[in-house]
Image: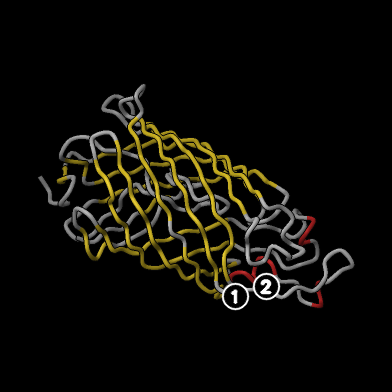
């Protein structure tokens, strides 16, 4: 069975993960939905919005607020799937304990005029990430799911006219989903993760070359290595037979005290926050249904 997920909510981190991934807006994190029954609709279509209050970049001491549209598409076929986990992935090996798939993530741009620390420096463009992932299902019960995600992704940036290589990152996560006791269609997602980046990725955020140096921003050569770790909590309400609305909200906190580039003049804060809220109107769910586990049509 192959799986592809198309859902743009972290923090797009429900995304999140639908929204979820801290300090990496649009990121994609595992869904905190726990489906009921033995079958699911073969097709789902929806559209919504998410609002995200997030730091300009990892280590920034300034925050900005962004509203983004959330297209929502789910297709569950024999070999191709699009599930509501906030990330794009194709499953190559899928069993009761382990999935091996490909995943994606991304973040929104930052203009040099909106961040004082980067004034006069090149903008941080839209960013995307693609790469393989091992997803380990540690525990599954009627009320809890405990999973570990181990992805390695290629990072790139784009101003929508060109694409630039930004190296790779390693982003292991562990997350616990629990059905809400007060809402049959609701669930909580608690997660912890950490991020390491290659020299290219760290240079993009933290390097200061001579032409951009100032008295308050000295030359700095960024190093590869640990970037930050984070914790978060989100809540999601899924559609019911009588209501097509998905809504979600959550927050996360990232810590950079031990970052490889803690001494960069662009590292202005060792704690970053993200808060997000959003909704999706799931306006179409097909009559055709598929097995919850196998993807085979029923």
Q: Nearer the viewer, residue 296 or 189?
A: 189
Q: Identify residue for label 1.
A: 199
Q: Determine the residue located farthest toward the right in the rendered image.
A: 215
Report the residue at 23% width, 38% height from top. 141
Q: Determine the residue located farthest toward the left in the rendered image.
A: 298
**Which quarter of the image is occupied by the C terminus?**
top left
Q: Label 1: state its secondary structure.
A: helix
In this picture, residue 66 sits left or right of residue 132: right
Report the residue at 40% width, 63% height from top. 151
Q: Please tell me in which quadrant of the rendered image residue 237 appears.
A: top left
Q: Residues within 10 Å of mark 2 (few under 14, many from 20)?
A: many
| CB atoms of marks 1 and 2 within 8 Å | yes
The answer to whether one can see residue 163 in this image is: no
Q: Nearer the viewer, residue 98 or 258?
A: 258
Q: Identify residue for label 2.
A: 222
**Which quarter of the image is occupied by the N terminus?**
bottom left
Depicted 277 relative to depicted 202: above or below = above
Depicted 38 relative to depicted 222: above or below = above
* Residue 153: percent from left, percent from top: 45, 67
Q: Please tell me in which quadrant of the rendered image residue 34 appears.
A: top left
Mark count = 2
Which disc is residue 173 wearing? none
In this picture, residue 7 sits left or right of residue 81: right
Q: Determine the residue located farthest toward the bottom in the rendered image.
A: 210
């Amino acid at each position: 069975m192959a799986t592809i997920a198309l859902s743009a909510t972290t923090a797009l981190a429900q995304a999140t993960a639908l929204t979820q991934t801290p300090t990496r807006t649009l990121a994609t994190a595992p869904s905190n939905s726990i489906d009921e029954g033995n079958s699911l609709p073969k097709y789902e279509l929806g559209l919504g919005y998410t609002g995200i209050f997030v730091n300009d970049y990892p280590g920034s001491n300034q925050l900005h607020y962004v509203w983004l549209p959330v297209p929502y598409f789910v297709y569950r076929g024999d070999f191709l799937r699009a599930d509501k986990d906030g990330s794009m992935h194709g499953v190559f090996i899928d069993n009761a304990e382990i999935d091996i798939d490909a995943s994606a993530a991304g973040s929104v741009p930052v203009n040099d005029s909106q961040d004082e620390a980067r004034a006069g420096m090149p903008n941080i463009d839209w960013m995307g990430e693609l790469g393989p992932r091992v997803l380990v299902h540690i525990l599954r019960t009627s009320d809890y799911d405990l999973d570990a995600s181990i992805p390695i992704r290629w990072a790139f940036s784009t101003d929508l006219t060109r694409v630039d290589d930004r190296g790779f990152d390693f982003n292991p996560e562990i997350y616990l989903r629990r059905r809400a006791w007060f809402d049959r269609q609701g669930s909580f997602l608690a997660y912890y993760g950490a991020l390491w980046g290659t020299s290219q990725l760290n240079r993009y955020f933290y390097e200061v070359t001579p032409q951009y140096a100032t008295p308050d921003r000295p030359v700095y050569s960024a190093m590869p290595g640990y970037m930050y770790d984070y914790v978060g909590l989100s809540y999601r309400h899924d559609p019911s037979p009588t209501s097509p609305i998905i809504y979600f909200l959550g927050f996360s906190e990232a810590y950079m005290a031990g970052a490889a580039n803690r001494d960069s003049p662009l590292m202005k804060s060792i704690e970053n926050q993200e808060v997000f809220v959003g909704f999706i109107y799931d306006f179409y769910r097909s009559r055709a249904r598929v097995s919850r586990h196998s993807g085979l049509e029923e």
